[in-house]
Image (spheres, helix red, strand yellow):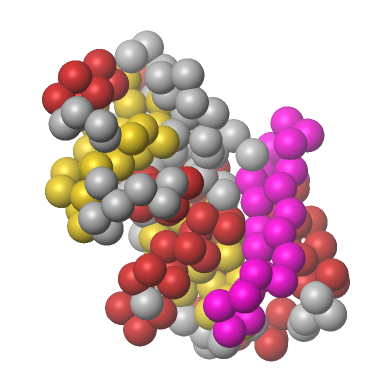
Amino acid sequence: MVILAVSTSAKYPSAALSKGGELLAFRIDESGLSHMKTIFGLIDSVLAETNTALPDVDAFAVDIGPGSFMGVRIGVSAVNAMAYALKKPVLPVSSLAALRHMTASSGAVAAIIDARNGNGYAAVYNNGRETVAPCPCIIKDITDALPEGAEIVGDCCGHYDICNAMLVLDEVAAIGVDSLKTSEAIPMYLRPSQAERMRK
C-alpha cells in the first residue's frame, strides 16, 4: 500500500511517502514560510523523488492535532481534498500519538506540545496503550504527576521534538490502516482558538 503522509500541526510542515511499510521519501520545510505556501511543494517533492503519481497513492495520512490551529486546518483540508478527488481513504492520527514514536521506551511516555505561557496539550502512553487521553493541560501539573522514570517527548521542558510526517506513518503502522480508514479527517481542537478567546 502506498501512503502519503502530511504533518502540519507543528512549526515545520512535512510530507512523507511509504510503500508496503517502507519509508521512500521525506521532506520538511524549515523556511518559516506559511504552511499554506509550502505543503503542496513538499507533497510534489516526495512524489517526484519516488516517481509516484498522485492517483497511485492508496491512502492519505494526516496528523489532526492538537497543535497550531491554522496549521492543522491546512493539513486536514489538503488531505481531505486529495482523498475526496481520488476517492481514497483518509488515515487521521493524533499528533500526540505520533510523537510517542520519538522513543522506543516501553514504559510511560508523556507526549506534550507547548501551547505557550505554561500551557500545553498532553497525552500519556504506557506500553503502547493510551493511559491519559489528549487534553489541554498546565505542563507542570502533567510533568509533576508522571511516574518515576517516565519519558517526555515534544517541544516542552527543554525538548525540541515536533510531530512530523514520518512519525505519522509510524502511528499508522502501530494502529493499522484498517482501524483508521475514514472518508474525512476532522481536526482535533482541544482549546478555542485565540480569535475565539478574544471574541469572548
In the figure, is residue 162 to the left or right of 15? Answer: left
Residue 103: image location, x then y, percent: 43, 46
Residue 95: image location, x then y, percent: 42, 49
Q: Is residue 58 above or below residue 119?
A: below
The part of the image, by quadrant, that contains residue 171 is bottom left
How many dots with numbers? 0
In the figure, is residue 130 to the left or right of 28? Answer: left
User: In the rendered structure, does residue 21 fall within the stretch colored magenta?
Assistant: yes
Q: Residue at x 69, y 37 (%)?
A: 34
Residue 129: image location, x then y, percent: 21, 57
Q: Residue at x 56, y 78 (%)?
A: 21
Q: Residue at x 26, y 34 (%)?
A: 150
Residue 28: image location, x then y, percent: 71, 48
In the figure, is residue 69 to the left or right of 25? Answer: left
Q: Residue at x 48, y 26 (%)?
A: 159
Query: Which quarter of the figure is the C terminus placed in?
Result: top left
Query: Which quarter of the figure is the N terminus placed in?
Result: bottom right
Looking at the rendering, the stretch of residues picked out in magenta corresponds to 13-37
The part of the image, by quadrant, that contains residue 152 is top left
In the figure, is residue 80 to the left or right of 11? Answer: left
**Which residue is nearer to you in this view: 66 or 170?**
170
Q: Is residue 33 visible?
A: no
Q: Is residue 1 above or below residue 40?
A: below
Q: Is residue 107 visible?
A: yes
**Which residue is nearer to you in this view: 44 or 80?**
44
**Which residue is nearer to you in this view: 13 or 22?**
22
User: In the rendered structure, does residue 48 fall within the stretch colored magenta?
Assistant: no
Q: Is residue 81 above or below residue 15?
A: below
